[in-house]
Image (tube, rainbow, N blue to C red):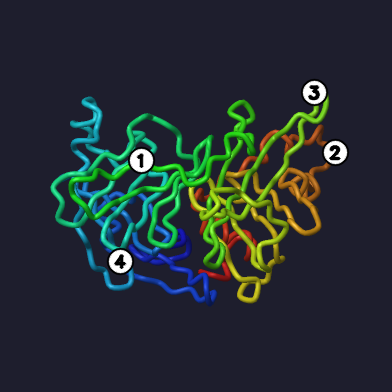
Amino acid sequence: MLDKAAAPHRCRRFLNLATGECIRMHLPELEEHALLALTPEGLILLLDEPTRVVRLLNPLTRQLTDLPPVTALLKPEWHLERNLGKIIKVHGAGIVDASMVAVSFGCPRVLVVAKPRDERWTLVDSSRRFFRSVLPFAGRFYCATRGGIEVLNASTDHQVSPRLLMAVDWSRSLHVSEIMNDSLHLVDNAGELMLGHRMLRCTRIDNYERRWGAYKVDLDAGVLVPAKSLCGRAVFVGARRTISVSVDVFDIAADTLYFGYECGGDTYNLRSGEATYYRDVIMESCDCDETDGPCNHNMDYEWQGPSDIVSCLCDCIQGIGKELA
């Protein structure tokens, strides 16, 4: 789902990543609920604020599926809050084993699961750990943390509580800096699980350099394998969602990481090692007249547009997205 720019009231645009086709859908449900998240399966996670019930919306059929209310997950001071949708933050959501919905909340910081018609959410993790990236992949739900990739073990045995298990332990092979605010990004690259790593490293005293890495996730061996290509595809990286697309559908460079503006807006080609820095692009396009005084574009280049990665994909491909309106 794209942003609602250039669309009639209550309409949203939807982009087919496989074909590049864009359609519009009239969805009054988005006006009646608070939008929590978009799932990689194409569903929309909504909150009915009066009842606190969470719902999944299929935008093509407009079918709504009720999930448990978030009441038990709220902090005491939130229970009387009317605009709860502005407080609750979701880092990611997806379908597990075709019957269970997993939701990683950033605020409150918990991982929970539920099935349709369940009365309450089942708590999986409440340790307040920061899940840097979450992704449903091949019927399972993966979470990237500072120490590795964990997988949700959602057993059908009701006597066994869902829990996170370590799938890839990189604590000794991959350094994820807290100080430099590294970011990790799981992505389904045409059926292959991969991980993107964005870093800021000190190269010498008072000099820092942005670096990037990409890895294939070998779940059988439990290791990361450095990748020098994306199998001819391109990957758009966002703070909460990362998407792999075919270069045959979109006119973009193969084996390239395109970072959404909330992730810096840079691009990096894995094969050539060539990088383009968003800040440099802004400076090159600056048309300030030096006679008017010093240029201040280097102080206000931060992206102020939509934070949704698909909207950033639209912007990156089409400039400002009008062609997809």
Counting residues from the start of the chain, the first of labels 4 and 1 encountered is 4
Could you tell me residue 173's position as x and y percent? 64, 38
Counting residues from the start of the chain, the first of labels 3 and 4 encountered is 4
- Label 3: how many residues lie within 10 Å, few (<14), some (14-19) or many (20+)? few
Name the residue tied to disc 3.
206
The numbered dot on residue 290 is 2
Name the residue tied to disc 4.
58
Q: Quadrant of residue 209?
A: top right
Distance between the Cα atoms at labels 2 and 4? 53 Å
The numbered dot on residue 105 is 1
- Label 1: how many residues lie within 10 Å, few (<14), some (14-19) or many (20+)? many
Distance between the Cα atoms at labels 1 and 3? 36 Å
- Residue at 70%, 45% (x, y): give it: 212
Could you tell me residue 132's position as x and y percent? 50, 40
Amino acid type, callout 4: Asn
Secondary-structure class at tag 4: strand
Counting residues from the start of the chain, the first of labels 2 and 3 encountered is 3
- Residue at 36%, 55% (x, y): give it: 94
- Label 4: how many residues lie within 10 Å, few (<14), some (14-19) or many (20+)? some
Tell me whether circle 1 and circle 3 mark residues in contact (CB < 8 Å).
no
Secondary-structure class at tag 3: loop
